[in-house]
Image (tube, rainbow, N blue to C red):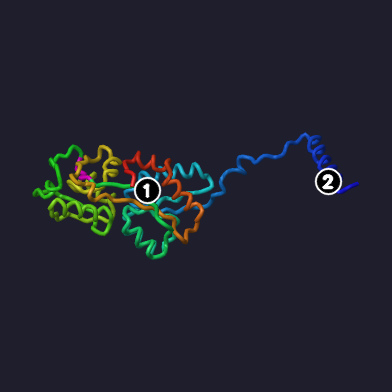
Amino acid sequence: MHRTGVLAAAVTAVLLLAGCSGSPVAEPTATQTEDSLSGDLTVYAAASLSGAFDELAKEFSAAHPGVTVKPISYDGSSVLATQLIGGAPADVFASADEKNMAKVTDAGLAEEPVDFAANVMQIATAPGNPKGITDLASLTAKGLTVVLCAPEVPCGAASQTLLKNAGVTLAPASEEQNVTAVLTKVASGEADAGLVYVTDVEAAGDAVTGIPIDGADAATNVYPIAALKDAPNADAAAAFVAFVTSPEGRAVLEEFGFEAP
């Protein structure tokens, strides 16, 4: 028999056997087609991202059940940057400004950052604004207890820019290392007012009243996110960054009051 005849006969035999077996060719199962991401994911994020990132982590975990997002480390961006440069192990860093992200990238620790959100400042007062605060100049009134973020953290740098633009000089009762601490002091009644992000006022609900600041856009903070180069879980880190910057991720951020970058 010629070679072509042998090949044809072999092909025919294979087809007949497949037909007689009654078993169709196996299709990939759902579990086989699911993504292969697994392990723990460690995220360092600016304190002002707490509500939004808790929700993003929840949705990411639902989409990637093999990944366990560890409790997110929230703090001032400068504090987190210092920890990362000092060797703290993490997979993802989300900063409230580009300055502190640059510290991490300049140290060779992060992949290319992606801007994913923006935020502006407001004055937070006690519920109902009992002191009648109307603008930044109102914060200089005698007897007011005002708290600010420390100048080295993003909310503090933005506050200083706005105060300078308004020609206002304050002597704050304290300077906090993250915006959550400022909000907490106002909400608890320890302070009469503080400068925080719009998103913090929204998240606080009835615990505080927000007073818009004229010219707040002049101190808009843009938030970058990046996977870290020595991430223990590099694949999950890249996937989380992609999710945060996706349309789905941006929708969550908008729900929490963040603007597009």
Report helix, strand or loop for mark 2. Answer: helix
SS assignment for the magenta stretch, majority: strand
Q: Residue 2, how many percent across, how many down? A: 88, 47
Q: Is residue 206 left or right of residue 172?
A: right
Q: Residue at x 52, y 52 (%)?
A: 39
Rendered image: mark on residue 7: 2
Residue situated furthest right in the rendering: 1
The residue closer to the viewer here, 21 or 209, is 21
- Give the answer, above or below, for where 62 lies relative to 147: above
Across and down, in percent, residue 27 comes to 67, 39
Q: Is residue 169 left or right of residue 217?
A: left
Q: Please, what is the three-letter code of the amino acid marked with disc 2?
A: Leu
- Magenta span has 50? no
Residue at x-position 47% and y-position 61%: 230
Which dot, 2 or 1, sits closer to the camera?
Answer: 2
Q: Badge 1 is on which residue?
A: 116
Q: Which residues are magenta?
A: 122-126
Residue 14 quadrant: top right
Residue 96 at what x, y percent from top left? 32, 52
- Mark 1 is on which residue type? Phe
Q: Which residue occupies the foreground of this view, 140 or 218?
A: 218
